[in-house]
Image: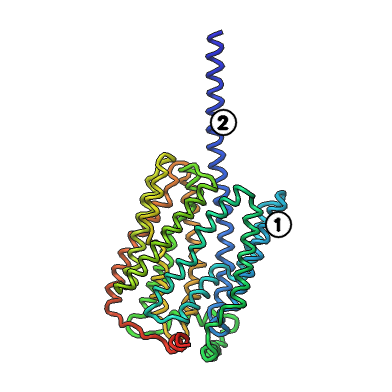
């Protein structure tokens, strides 16, 4: 009997280990499937906005920013509506969600939205205050991230997906109505006439005239080495994508064994700390008159430390290191507003929309490369080293810091641009 009991105990242990390894294998397979689904969705998010932003850049300079803001907001309302329908019909295949993606991407999604919003800010701000204003805009804008993640995670736990997506649809609708009724147009009638005349010069290009306008803006000859600086900043802006968090939710499930609620809480706290840190860094930089290159370097060093600390976490027992990482990465959000401020300061009057649209065009293309790199990396190393993306991101931060140190030396010899007549006119109003 004793031998039988021991044998039964050993069999139960074998079954338990089989279940354990079966769960590990299943989790890995699910992560790979979700990673590929997200990758396909990101391809749609890249290709369609790529086509749309080609036209919106010059058109927003001619017809104003508001129509395109409203179009994108309406697209987001439609997208969330599709998510609500899928929630109410769980038997539908998950691919139906692509329909929601198509709705918002057909009007440019975040590529157009970002371009138009930053063009709006460039319209109403002087070059001297642009970095600070864009930094504050980013802080307020992305402050919705931690609030949304935290609220969404707990709403999901208490009430399910329907409550999350219904609230999201209502908020997008409120944004649409607010822009429609309360936000004035930033492009003056005089500027619209000037931009229309410029567009007519490219009419011989036919349907490609909008592309021609964007390319002409980026490539036209400028004083000194301004054109080279513009190209350098555009390339730098693309490379910054490689430093940002990729597959973080999948990483947290694999390494920290977190669920949706735990991850949403972490990402909310992380976002909040980063936005507070960015505002403080921007205000300090404005007070002591730091150049935008120094602001961006501070952000990249901070992001590199964030990646390094997260990369050394081996398992759930060291979860508290994510708090240290969040504090060390608190200046990360200052990178992009600093680069955008330099870009818009280098171009001439009436060109901010075009250069940001050209940047959006490049970003939409680059997003395909970015997602391909990190999707492949994660799927390849998920079983043996799921921290691989964090290591690569940290390495890119080091390279970009060196590039910015070189650009800093060039900018020291660059004269400070004067505010444009259009900017002064709008500010005085």
What's the CA distance linking mark 2 and mark 1?
A: 35 Å
Q: How is the image coloured?
A: rainbow
255 over 132 or under it: above or below: above
Quadrant of res 167: bottom right
Secondary structure under tag 2 reads helix
**Labelled disc at residue 85:** 1
348 over 229 or under it: above or below: below
Q: How many tags in the picture?
A: 2
Secondary structure under tag 1 reads helix
Tell me: 278 left or right of 411.
right
Which residue does the numbered mark 2 point to in the structure image? 19
**Which residue lies at the image location 51% right of the left edge and 71% below the top edge?**
114
Percent x, y for residue 416? 32, 82
Q: Marks 1 and 2: in contact by CB < 8 Å?
A: no
Q: Of residues 318 and 413, which is closer to you in this image? A: 318
Percent x, y for residue 257? 49, 41
**Which residue lies at the image location 46% right of the left edge and 89% below the top edge?**
425
Q: Of residues 421 and 402, which is closer to you in this image? A: 421
76 over 358 or under it: above or below: above
Most extreme residue toward the top, as rendered? 1
**Which residue lies at the image location 53% right of the left edge and 54% below the top edge?**
150
């Amino acid at each position: 009997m004793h031998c039988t009991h021991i044998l039964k105990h050993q069999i139960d242990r074998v079954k338990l280990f089989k279940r354990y390894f079966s769960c590990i294998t299943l989790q890995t397979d699910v992560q790979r499937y979700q990673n590929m689904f997200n990758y396909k969705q990101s391809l749609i998010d890249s290709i369609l906005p790529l086509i749309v932003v080609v036209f919106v850049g010059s058109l927003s300079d001619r017809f104003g920013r508001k129509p395109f803001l409203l179009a994108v907001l309406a697209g987001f309302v439609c997208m969330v509506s599709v998510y609500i329908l899928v929630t109410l019909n769980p038997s539908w295949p998950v691919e139906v969600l692509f329909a929601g993606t198509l709705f918002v991407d057909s009007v440019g999604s975040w590529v157009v939205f970002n371009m138009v919003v930053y063009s709006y800010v460039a319209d109403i701000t002087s070059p001297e205050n642009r970095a600070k204003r864009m930094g504050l805009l980013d802080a307020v804008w992305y402050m919705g991230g931690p609030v949304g993640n935290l609220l969404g995670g707990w709403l999901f736990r208490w009430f399910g997906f329907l409550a999350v997506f219904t609230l999201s649809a209502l908020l997008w609708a409120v944004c649409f109505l607010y822009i429609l009724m309360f936000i004035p147009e930033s492009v003056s009638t005089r500027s619209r006439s000037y931009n229309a005349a410029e567009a007519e010069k490219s009419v011989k290009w036919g349907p490609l005239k909008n592309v021609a306008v964007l390319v002409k803006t980026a490539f036209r000859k400028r004083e000194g080495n301004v054109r080279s600086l513009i190209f350098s900043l555009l390339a730098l802006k693309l490379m910054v994508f490689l430093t940002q968090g990729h597959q973080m939710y999948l990483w947290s499930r694999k390494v920290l064994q977190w669920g949706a609620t735990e991850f949403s809480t972490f990402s909310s706290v992380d976002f909040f700390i980063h936005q507070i840190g960015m505002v403080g860094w921007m205000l300090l930089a404005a007070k002591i008159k730091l150049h935008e290159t120094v602001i961006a370097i501070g952000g990249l060093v901070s992001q590199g430390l964030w990646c390094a600390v997260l990369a050394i976490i081996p398992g759930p027992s060291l979860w508290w290191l994510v708090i240290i990482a969040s504090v060390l990465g608190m200046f990360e959000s200052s990178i992009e507003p600093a680069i955008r401020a330099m870009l818009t300061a280098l171009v001439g009057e009436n060109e901010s929309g075009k250069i940001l649209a050209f940047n959006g065009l490049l970003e939409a293309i680059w997003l395909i490369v970015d997602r391909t790199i990190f999707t492949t990396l994660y799927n390849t190393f998920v079983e043996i080293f799921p921290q691989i993306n964090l290591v690569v991101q940290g390495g890119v931060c080091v390279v970009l810091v060196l590039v910015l140190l070189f650009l800093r030396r060039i900018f020291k010899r660059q004269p400070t641009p004067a505010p444009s007549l259009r900017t002064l006119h709008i500010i005085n109003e």
